[in-house]
Amino acid sequence: MKYVRGGRLDQYIDAQQTLNQRLRLFCTICEAVAFAHAHGVIHRDLKPENIMVGQFGEVLVMDWGIAKVLGETETLGAVSNCAASGGTGHGVVMGTPEYMPPEQVSGQSANADRRADVYALGAILRFLLSSAPQPKRLAAICAKAMSALPEDRYGDAQALGADIDRYLDDRPVAAYRDTALERLARAISRHRFIVLLVLAYILMRVILIFFA
């Protein structure tokens, strides 16, 4: 078994002070989960304690004990955490309550798909943002990821990570519809140098006209 150097996510973020640092770390977590999703595997117990962060920011998702291969009825490992000792099938509650989607809480773990992990990732994102005010677009991303109905969530971890990438690039996100003023403000922010040049030109013209 590979020896993992690093700290748990809930311990590591103490050193991550900026919002962008936390969000970029979250994108890396989404990439790791998206890799599993691309191979038809869902974790079903994602939480900060199961994510290790190395000294260079590398991410390892740990504890795949109740993971599931989509399309198969058997899990990859033994029952853990809140799972009943009787098995991992229909009616058994598995996972960690504050990171579990409603379908797992109600004992539908056997029917969970990639969107169950999306819900847990949304809860992890909420945890990462808990110490700072949430901008509207980030709050909307969290809300979409943690929607009660699976069909209202992002389809998989890649889609969630992509929306965070769009936020970091100051582009529109899928989870939030900007107002006209918000679109204008973002456009000005992205092209502030050009805006300043135009304003300077207009001011110069006004001065020349005034003193003509």
Image (cartoon, rainbow, N blue to C red):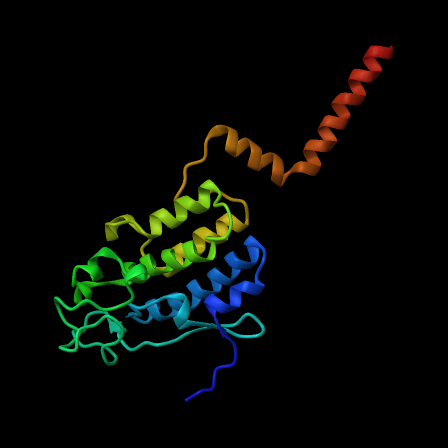
The mark total stands at 0
Q: Residue at x 16, y 63 (%)?
A: 107
The quadrant of the rendering that contains the N terminus is: bottom left
The relative height of residue 20 versus residue 43 in the rendered view (above or below) is above
Q: Residue at x 31, y 70 (%)?
A: 43
Residue 167 x/y as whole percent: 50, 48
Q: Is residue 130 left or right of residue 212?
A: left
- Asked whether the viewer can see residue 174, the reply is no
The relative height of residue 198 versus residue 60 in the rendered view (above or below) is above
Residue 198 x/y as whole percent: 72, 28
Residue 204 x/y as whole percent: 80, 22
The quadrant of the rendering that contains the C terminus is: top right
- Asked whether the viewer can see residue 162, the reply is yes
Q: Of residues 135 and 183, which is closer to you in this image?
A: 135
The relative height of residue 71 versus residue 123 in the rendered view (above or below) is below
Q: Is residue 83 left or right of residue 41?
A: left
Q: Residue at x 12, y 66 (%)?
A: 91
Q: Is residue 169 left or right of residue 139?
A: right
Q: Residue at x 31, y 68 (%)?
A: 45
Query: Which residue in the rendered view is the most extreme toward the bottom?
Result: 1
Please tell me in which quadrant of the rendered image residue 99 appears: bottom left
Please tell me in which quadrant of the rendered image residue 161 appears: bottom left
